[in-house]
């Protein structure tokens, strides 16, 4: 049975759908005022893989991933660019979809935009005000009264007293409690606005996901996902809004992917280690980036570095080289009783453990190199396809390498490092790995020559 680590329960739990054979999933998407960065890419790839696995297990999937197209940052950026909000958000939605497609991410079943659901947000805020869970402040804003929702903090595992003591909260004389959060913002001069019972304004960020998930999935659904940074306060606030409005459980399973780090430091613009997907794809093939993301468990930190991407490319090359040398049998279908397929399924059913699933792919590649089994080549390609991998023509993949893979971009230190990896592989009896490194270097214009004095190299 599929097990999912449920953030709210803080343990792995058997997945039991609300409706047998169906799964409803909502994932917090992008705020579209700039290009997607590597953290966004991780969310996109992780939940695309989750959806693929549910479909592989014959679930009917209703997958919603929202777009925030009205927000303080969007308004500020549009003003800085001297362009309309509509033009700005349209441009970056298009860019987001281009980046997603490059990474092999399928479009969700629904991609609602916040501006399309303001009426539903106003209605939900009205319910919360009527129930005494929200109040209209003297500055014109409407706030959620956290104190009046007794189970606030159950997702983050913190009590209100812990949150007040440990969190940096904004001091605002308009709020009854520093932890209260805004549901409706009164319009400032020059800002876009909608009419509401509380005057002209626009919705706060948190309310959009509660309103859109209700409209598209109902008041109770199976899985809510997003980055770990959203667990508090965004997802905590969603629970307060939705359960406060409906007096009904909101979500059964909460999934959060881990943070992205760069050379073991938090990725941030202020540290100068901030990378957009587009910048990375100038150096590495999109499938290499997807493979890099999936080689780490989705809940673990993902540490980006050039060396890690180079190692990832070598690893993916090994799989494609196996498929290039032995053409897959196109008639092969996955026999889930076979040892390799069963191991793959056990890994994926264990909280979407893609690193262990990928280890099965390497076992198959090693066996293909030894036995030239077309059946195993077919299984390798089929299992890889469930992760969105290994569907390119192997020859085309191996030849279509961006600049970072060209021989003049491999420095002597890079080449010597790969030679040392090859030497280690041979010492450990991993001859197929050693051969894969040699072939990879040869395809990048570097020829290895073994002699009595060791291994030397030259450019072709």
Image (cartoon, grey):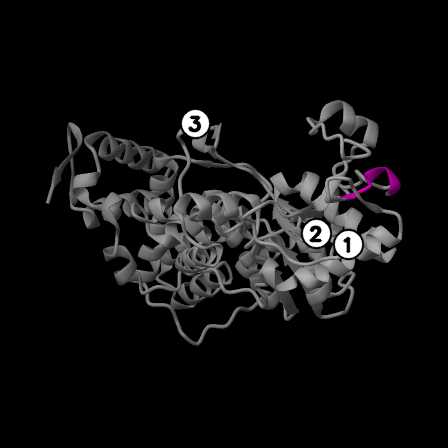
Where residue 147 sits, quadrant-wise, is top right
- Quadrant location of the N terminus? bottom right
Q: Residue at x 89, y 52 (%)?
A: 131
User: In the rendered structure, which segment of residues is drawn in magenta?
Assistant: 143-148
Identify the disc placed on residue 271: 3
Find the residue positioned furthest to the bottom: 331
For this rendering, which residue is in front, 396 or 224?
224
Q: Residue at x 26, y 52 (%)?
A: 401
Spot occupied by residue 315 in the image (x, y as percentages of width and height): 37, 46
Foreground residue, 121 or 373? 121
Residue 147 shown in magenta: yes
Give the spatial CA distance, label 2 vs label 3. Answer: 32 Å
Residue occupied by mark 2: 207
Q: Is residue 1 visible?
A: no
Residue picked out by circle 1: 125
Residue 237 drawn at (x, y percent): 74, 44
Question: Is residue 161 found inside the magenta-colored segment of the image?
Answer: no
Q: Is residue 144 left or right of residue 380?
A: right
- Which quadrant is the C terminus positioned in? top left
Real-space Cα separation, disc 1 to disc 2, in angstroms: 8 Å
Q: Residues within 10 Å of mark 1 (few under 14, many from 20)?
A: many
Of tags 1 and 3, which is closer to the observer?
1
Q: Earlier in the sequence, mark 1 or mark 2?
A: 1
- Badge 3 density bin: few <14, some 14–19, many ≥20, Cα 10 Å: few
Q: In the drawing, does residue 398 fall left or right of residue 455?
A: right
Residue at figure coordinates x 53%, y 51% from the top left: 30
In primary-sequence order, the first of circles 1 and 3 is 1
Circles 1 and 3: CB atoms closer than 8 Å: no
What is the x, y in percent for residue 72? Answer: 56, 44
| Separation of residues labelled 1 and 3 (CA atoms) | 39 Å
């Amino acid at each position: 049975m599929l097990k999912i680590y449920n953030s709210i329960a803080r343990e792995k739990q058997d997945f039991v759908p609300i409706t047998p054979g169906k799964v409803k999933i909502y994932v917090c998407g992008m705020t579209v005022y700039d290009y997607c960065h590597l953290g966004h890419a991780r969310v996109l790839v992780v939940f695309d893989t989750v959806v693929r696995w549910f479909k592989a297990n014959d679930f009917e999937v209703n997958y919603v991933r929202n777009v925030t197209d009205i927000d303080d940052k969007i308004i500020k950026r549009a003003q800085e660019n001297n362009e309309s909000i509509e033009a700005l958000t349209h441009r970056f939605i298009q860019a987001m979809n281009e980046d997603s497609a490059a990474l092999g991410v399928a479009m969700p079943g629904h991609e609602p935009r916040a501006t399309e659901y303001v009426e539903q947000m106003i209605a939900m805020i009205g319910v919360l005000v009527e129930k005494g869970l929200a109040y209209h402040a003297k500055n014109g804003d409407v706030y959620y009264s956290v104190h009046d929702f007794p189970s606030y903090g159950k997702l983050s595992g913190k009590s209100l007293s812990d949150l007040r003591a440990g969190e940096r909260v904004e001091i605002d004389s308009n709020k009854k409690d520093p932890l209260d959060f805004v549901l409706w913002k009164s319009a400032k001069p020059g800002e876009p606005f909608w009419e509401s019972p509380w005057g002209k304004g626009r919705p706060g960020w948190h309310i959009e996901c509660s309103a859109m998930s209700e409209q598209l999935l109902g008041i109770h659904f199976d899985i809510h996902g997003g980055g770990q940074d959203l667990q508090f306060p965004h997802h905590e606030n969603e629970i307060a809004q939705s359960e406060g409005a409906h007096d009904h459980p909101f979500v059964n399973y909460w999934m959060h992917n881990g943070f992205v780090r760069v050379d073991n430091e938090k990725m941030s613009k202020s540290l100068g280690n901030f990378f957009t997907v587009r910048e990375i794809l100038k150096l590495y093939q999109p499938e290499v980036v997807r493979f890099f993301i999936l080689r780490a468990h989705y809940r673990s930190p993902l540490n980006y570095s050039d060396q890690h991407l180079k190692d990832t490319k070598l690893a993916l090359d090994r799989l494609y080289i196996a498929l290039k040398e032995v053409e897959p049998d196109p008639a092969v279908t996955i026999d889930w009783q076979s040892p390799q397929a069963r191991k793959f399924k056990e890994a994926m059913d264990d909280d979407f453990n893609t690193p262990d699933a990928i280890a099965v792919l390497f076992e198959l590649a090693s066996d293909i190199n030894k036995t030239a089994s077309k059946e195993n080549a077919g299984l390798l390609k089929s299992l890889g396809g469930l992760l969105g991998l290994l569907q390119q023509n192997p020859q085309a993949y191996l030849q279509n390498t961006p600049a970072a893979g060209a021989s003049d971009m491999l420095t002597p230190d890079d080449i010597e490092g790969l030679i040392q990896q090859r030497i280690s592989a041979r010492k450990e009896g991993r001859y197929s790995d050693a051969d894969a490194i040699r072939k990879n270097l040869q395809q990048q214009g570097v020829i290895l020559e073994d002699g009595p004095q060791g291994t030397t190299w030259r450019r072709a």
